[in-house]
Image (cartoon, grey):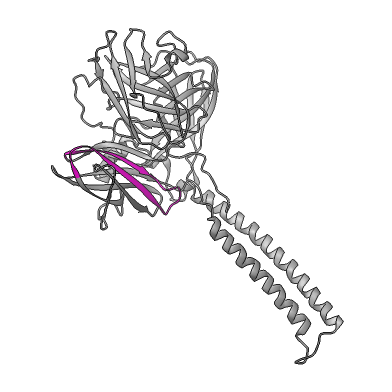
Amino acid sequence: MVAFVALADAHVGSPDVFYEGMAGPYRLFVTVRTPPMIPGIAEIEVRALDGNVTDIRIVPLRAVGEGSEFAPPSDRMEHSQADAQCFTGKLWLMQSGEWQVRMEVSGTKGTGETAVPVPAAARRTLRMQKTTGTVLLALMVVLVASMIAIFGAAARDGQLDPGATPSTSQRRRGRIAMAVTAAALVAILFLGNMWWDAAASGRANLMMYKAPPVEASLQNTNTLVLKMGFSSWHDRRKDTLVDTIIPDHGHLMHLFLIGTPNLDRFYHLHPQQTAGDTFAEQLPAVAAGNYAVFADIVRGSGFPDTMTTRVSLPDVPGNPPSGDDSETTVGSLAGTSPAQNAGTVFTLPDHSHWDWVLDGQTLHARQPMVLRFRILDKDGKPVSDLEPYMGMAGHLVIVKRDLTVFAHVHPSGSMPMAALMLLQKQPSTAKTEMAAMPDMPSTALPAEVTFPYGFPEPGDYRLFVQIKRSGKVQTATFDTHVEP
């Protein structure tokens, strides 16, 4: 079978789910590796970061609607032989859409529960196993050869008396019948294979997830207009985007413009919805160039989409970003070249700096980890003026150099906050209350921001880390290489 690879997914090229949060008295780091096909098996890893956990039971449920309330019998996760606080398990996800993995955790501090949002969608078809293909090919050869022999024998011997020897003409008729049969079977197999490929392609286009297409255009000198289309996976469910978009961090869309090919310009904007399928953003001052566009939305079920396109912009006049909008040019904040900002330290104009705490650790693909960033003042002391930025301690955007990976991550994990909130609210009130962010302290936040994540594949990446200090959004950039 031919493998059909999806062009994009909820996080482009980064389908696994990473979550860090509390289950009662226990802090957990959860990794859910979503299946490439639906139905399929999700692989789940849980590490207890504090508290002595002795048992974890898991069960899959739909995030909202039918199938979200009454849980089937749960499965017990297996203890790791190497680490008593690490657990592994597997769950079947039977349909595409937004799911939740509900967990019941037991330990020395009692019991606790939590639920992790998991978007499930088919991203490709799987190749047939070589052993199965070999066996089926051998059976097909035997079957074809048998049919050729049967038709040849029927034409040659069908009218012979018992024990009689076929004449020359009868042998010739048998060979002709075998040749005609062979040609007919080859034609049938060829046409059948063409039909199968067409049917498989059509089925793949129907069932494989693709984010809705989006077109970006500049209007009235400084207004970027985004017009969304609809994916076949979405249309098949008789849904419309206008009815299902819900706010995430107080905004219906998070728009990222990243300058290409050097990833040297970065804009985090929040367009307004002007029609059912259209958003518009009055741009700040933007330098001329080519930009990769990543537009994040969340459907009413909690399923996230990252729509992608490219756009070429002239020099756009405008004011500096305000509110939750932000921009940065790599190197300009520190007055240095990108190479001087690469690595684990990023310096700001006021001589404060960010440390990416790696402790000499080498990054490897598909290795879950907590990315830690410390913000220090010019004297090397932790800063005391961090504030919540859109309800979170920070935001992290991860982009692979070739743009095949894009992920928008928060301290709680890689899923949107709207999906987490849906699991905590009744569906009837979730849409109206989704703009409200979780309560965060009004006092200064700790000077360390963490993000649970696992790089999906090896290669070169750029990280854009965003926080808010004294009312202003700041962005630090880090470059890194991920080993296999």
Residue 178 in the image: state x and y as whole percent: 76, 73
Q: Position of residue 170 (x, y in %)?
A: 83, 82
Can residue 381 be seen here? yes
Residue 28 included in the magenta stretch of the image: yes
Q: Position of residue 123 (x, y in %)?
A: 48, 46
Determine whether 75 is above or below 172 in the image: above
- Identify which residue is drawn at 45% across, 16% down: 330
Between 169 and 385, the residue placed more toward the observer is 169
Magenta segment boundaries in residue numbering: 25-53
Locate residue 399, reporting x and y percent.
45, 28
Give the prevailing secondary structure in the magenta stretch.
Answer: strand
Q: Is residue 192 magenta?
A: no
User: Residue at horizontal 38%, vertical 31%?
Assistant: 408
Asked whether 93 or 132 is in front, the reply is: 132
Q: Is residue 272 left or right of residue 386?
A: right
The number of numbered badges drawn on the structure is: 0
Instruction: Please state, as top left, top right, bottom left or bottom right, where the N terminus lies in the image.
Output: bottom right
In this image, 213 relative to 243: left or right? right
Residue 122 horizontal side relative to residue 244, left or right: right
**Splitting the image into 4 quarters, where does residue 282 fall?**
top left
Q: Is residue 324 visible?
A: no
Q: Residue furthest left?
A: 109
Q: Residue furthest bottom?
A: 162
Q: Going by the picture, which residue comes out furthest to the front?
A: 82
